[in-house]
């Protein structure tokens, strides 16, 4: 028979309890290196960009003066800004729409039991690992006016080549297509991951209820893919709205600023015209635009998420 002394729980180790009590402080100190890197490479450049936007700095000289909000007044009166913002939204929203549609279609197709699906996934994802600048030049040699692969074919049927990259009504959509082609593999992978965690019981229940393929997609697949859609849309929006490499490689923003994005225009102003103060004000505008669009999309899409 056990005595009351034997039934008592063992006394806590005071030394171990003391260490555990102080462990959250040490864990919080582990954030310090990451916060330091964030402050040096993110927060400080962002702060300097705001300061520079209120100056007439040329980007190289040691002397400059503060000019207040003159750069912002100039920005809102600049006749090219409206078109550049429109291009930026096309690159962001247009690429996001096309990437998600194509990525979802590929994911649904390659989620089936197909013998070569591994190879197909690799081929579709392969353009992602190529530098966007290199990808832009590859497609530039395809669309260029003289000597381009496309115009070599066109010249077989007509006397003059087609200047697609010089047409302001077409070149923006060509750049959007190239950006979509390169990064739709990311959307495909995100949707594939989402499809593979949907419980098969849901599809079996839908089959018992008499749902066909379209009904299963509408009532099972699409709601369950809401978290994947949120991630894919937000990532694609941010990448498209700050598009720079492909624009620079294919048209350099031309003719004029007809195909420029905010990123490429900012680059031309800083290094081409040595107008760093005005370029910084455009950078702040781009930050506000990306934040507003991406946060709005994030809040809207999070509302329709359903956990499996």
Image (cartoon, rainbow, N blue to C red):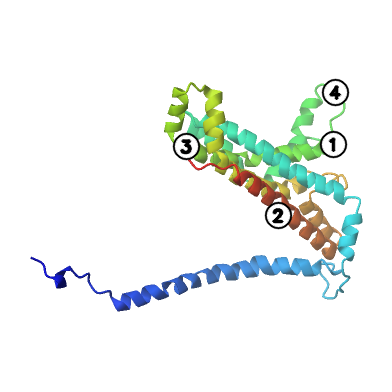
The local secondary structure at tag 2 comes to: helix
| Residue visible at 37% across and 76% down in the picture | 19
Estimate the spatial distance between the alpha carbons at disc 3 and disc 4, rounded to whole Å. Answer: 53 Å
Mark 1 or mark 4, whichever is nearer to me: 1
Disc 3 vs disc 4: which is toward the camera?
Answer: 3
Residue at 78% over, 70% down: 51
Could you tell me how far apart the alpha carbons at marks 2 and 3 are, in whole angstroms? 31 Å
Along the line of sight, which residue is nearer the eye, 267 or 105? Answer: 105
The mark nearer the N terminus, 1 or 4, is: 4
* Residue assigned mark 4: 158
Q: Are marks 1 and 3 in contact (CB under 8 Å)?
A: no
Dot 4: element = loop
* Marks 2 and 3, the one that precedes in the sequence: 3
Which numbered disc, 3 or 4, marks the residue that appears first in the sequence? 4
> Are there few (<14), some (14-19), or many (20+) residues within 10 Å of tag 4?
few
Q: Which mark is residue 169?
A: 1
Tag 3 residue: 198
Instruction: Identify the secondary structure beneath mark 3.
Output: loop
Q: Residue at x 84, y 31 (%)?
A: 162
């Amino acid at each position: 028979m056990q005595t009351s002394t034997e039934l008592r729980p063992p006394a806590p180790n005071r030394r171990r309890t003391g260490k555990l009590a102080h462990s959250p402080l040490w864990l919080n100190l582990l954030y310090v290196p990451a916060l330091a890197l964030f402050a040096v490479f993110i927060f400080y450049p962002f702060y300097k960009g705001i300061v520079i936007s209120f100056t007439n700095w040329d980007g190289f000289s040691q002397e400059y003066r503060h000019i207040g909000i003159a750069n912002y007044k100039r920005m809102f009166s600049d006749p090219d800004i409206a078109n550049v913002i429109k291009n930026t939204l096309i690159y962001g929203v247009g690429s996001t729409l096309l990437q998600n549609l194509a990525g979802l279609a590929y994911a649904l197709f390659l989620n089936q039991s197909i013998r070569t699906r591994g190879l197909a996934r690799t081929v579709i994802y392969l353009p992602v690992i190529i530098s966007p600048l290199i990808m832009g030049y590859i497609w530039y040699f395809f669309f260029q006016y003289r000597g381009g692969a496309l115009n070599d074919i066109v010249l077989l049927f007509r006397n003059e080549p087609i200047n697609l990259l010089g047409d302001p009504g077409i070149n923006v959509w060509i750049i959007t297509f190239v950006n979509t082609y390169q990064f739709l593999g990311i959307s495909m992978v995100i949707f594939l991951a989402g499809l593979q965690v949907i419980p098969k019981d849901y599809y079996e229940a839908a089959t018992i209820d008499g749902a066909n393929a379209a009904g299963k997609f509408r009532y099972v697949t699409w709601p369950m893919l809401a978290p994947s859609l949120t991630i894919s849309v937000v990532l694609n929006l941010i990448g498209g709205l700050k598009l720079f490499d492909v624009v620079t490689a294919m048209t350099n923003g031309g003719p004029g600023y007809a195909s420029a994005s905010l990123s490429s225009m900012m680059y031309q102003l800083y290094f081409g015209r040595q107008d760093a103060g005005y370029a910084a004000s455009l950078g702040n505008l781009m930050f506000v635009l990306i934040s507003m669009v991406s946060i709005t999309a994030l809040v809207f899409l999070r509302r329709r998420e359903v956990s499996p």
